[in-house]
Amino acid sequence: MAVQPYFPRNSELVSQEAGLVLVNHAGSTASQDTGRDAQALADALRLVVVAADRPGTAGTVPRKAQRNALATPSGYVAESASLGYAIDHQADMLGLKRLAITGRSAGGLGALALIRSETISAASYLFAAEPPGCKAVPLKQGLQEFKEYGVQQKQLQQQGRVHVPPRSALQQPQAMLRLGSIAKNVFYDRFHNDAIWASDAAVVFSRHIAANQPAVSAAIVFAEHSLVVDSQTYRRELLPATSLRTGGAPFTIDQIASTTHASFDDQNLFALLLRPTVEHMLSHEV
């Protein structure tokens, strides 16, 4: 599990004490796609961004024991704890006293698990986009729904009804190397984590954070045309979690209009959506 900091390239830090943690999405690593995303966020928001690899990712040798350990919400949190401690150590070395934990897709679920683990002393802000684990389904059914969603998403993009992320700016041969690394990383990631993605872990974590961690300011967002949650589950399972927050910091769950799961791959859009969380964090500078 790699933990790697990124710094703004062309501007000074807006804060010496506040930073972000970006958890890797499926098929990415802290030194590859997630690292590029972390650098883009560091440049856009002028903060230190620590890229972090979830358990069972980043080219990990497939291990059935780890797959089993990651298969339940409680096991996933326990496995994420070691990553949390590594982030906590890195934050201490960097002098960061306030952290916002963030991620999209599988990284969003990883961000929820890190907050739930309570292993990062500086972490009191959360922004998670399109986290899987919103409804427990059989793995075979989940795979079929994923394939069907890919077709639907492409149709929506072609019809111009949703935000489409720009193409990668990488040139050959870097683009080919990137595709090869994604395929390898997706294999490892799916082997270890597909069970938790097909669970209700995101609902479990959201409810716990809302009810039991009132100091955490949380914003969880989903696409209007979501891969990970249907409208009924969103209304009946996710939105009620907001009522569990009866005091303390804000806790919100929202949908972003004219988006699909892939829309959050756009670095500019993600930075724009993340900015209110960052501004809230910076407003508490001493």
Image (cartoon, rainbow, N blue to C red):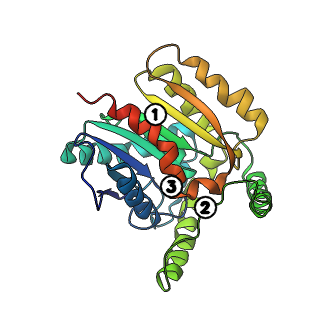
Q: Is residue 182 left or right of residue 1?
A: right
Name the kind of residue labelled 1 in the image.
Answer: Arg
Q: CA distance from mark 1 to mark 2?
A: 30 Å
Give the mark, 1 or 3, whose residue is nearer the N terminus: 1
Query: Tag 2, which secondary structure?
Result: loop
Q: Residue at x 59, y 39 (%)?
A: 221
In the displayed structure, would residue 183 be above or below residue 69?
below
In the image, 158 versus 265, the foreground residue is 158
Outermost residue on the top side: it is: 246
Name the kind of residue labelled 2 in the image.
Answer: Pro
Outermost residue on the bottom side: it is: 173
Give the mark, 1 or 2, whose residue is nearer the N terminus: 1
Q: Which residue is mark 3?
A: 268
The image's mark for residue 116 is: 1
Mark toward the viewer: 1 or 3: 3
Mark toward the viewer: 1 or 2: 2
Q: Which residue is mark 2?
A: 165
Query: Tag 3, which secondary structure?
Result: helix
